[in-house]
Each structure stands twice: as C-alpha cells, then as structure tokens.
Amino acid sequence: MNIARIYLRVSTDEQDLTRQADIEQSTRGAGYYIAGVYREKASGARIDRPELQRMIADLQPGEVVIAEKN
C-alpha cells in the first residue's frame, strides 16, 4: 500500500488553504492512502512550524510527503 502524508502551508493570513484541497483528491486518485494532512499558516523561512514538526515526527518508513510548490 502506498501511504502519503500531505503538508499544506501558506505564508500569510490573506492566503488560505482551500486552493490546495485538490492535492488530497489527486493523491487519492494516484492510489495513495492519506495517513495525515498537516495544515498551517506560517512563513517558509521559519523553522518553528508546529505542523511541519508534527508531520516529521509522524512519518513512518516508506511513506511519502506531498507538498505544493508555488
């Protein structure tokens, strides 16, 4: 079974995560089971992103991470 974790991030309060919702659908369509979706609003320059850290801690061997590139 292919297992994925999805990380969705925007940088500002003016942006929202709704535009990234199709990532979940396309991931399932590609045959992946989604073990977790991690969403946050934080600058990519910051290392103290709680959802990113939680996702990293949750990752298991063989899982893939899917993230949007802008």
Image: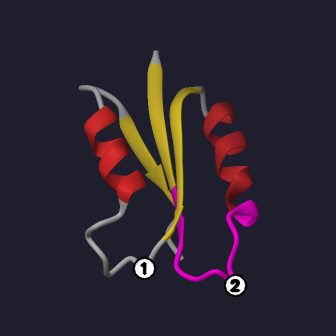
**Is residue 23 magenta-colored?**
no
**As shown in the figure, which amino acid type bears the numbered disc 2?**
Glu
Q: Is residue 61 above or below residue 69?
A: above
Residue at 42% x, 53% y is: 51
Residue at which label 2 appears: 14
Residue at 30% x, 51% y is: 53
Residue at which label 1 appears: 43
* Figure quadrant of residue 39: bottom right
Q: Foreground residue, 24 or 26?
A: 24
Badge 1 or badge 2: first in the primary sequence: 2
Q: Is residue 47 above or below residue 30?
A: below
- Mark 1 secondary-structure assignment: loop
**As shown in the figure, which amino acid type bears the numbered disc 1?**
Ser
Q: Which residues are magenta?
A: 8-19
How far from the left and from the top, in percent, is residue 40? 52, 61
- Does residue 52 appear left or right of residue 42 in this picture? left
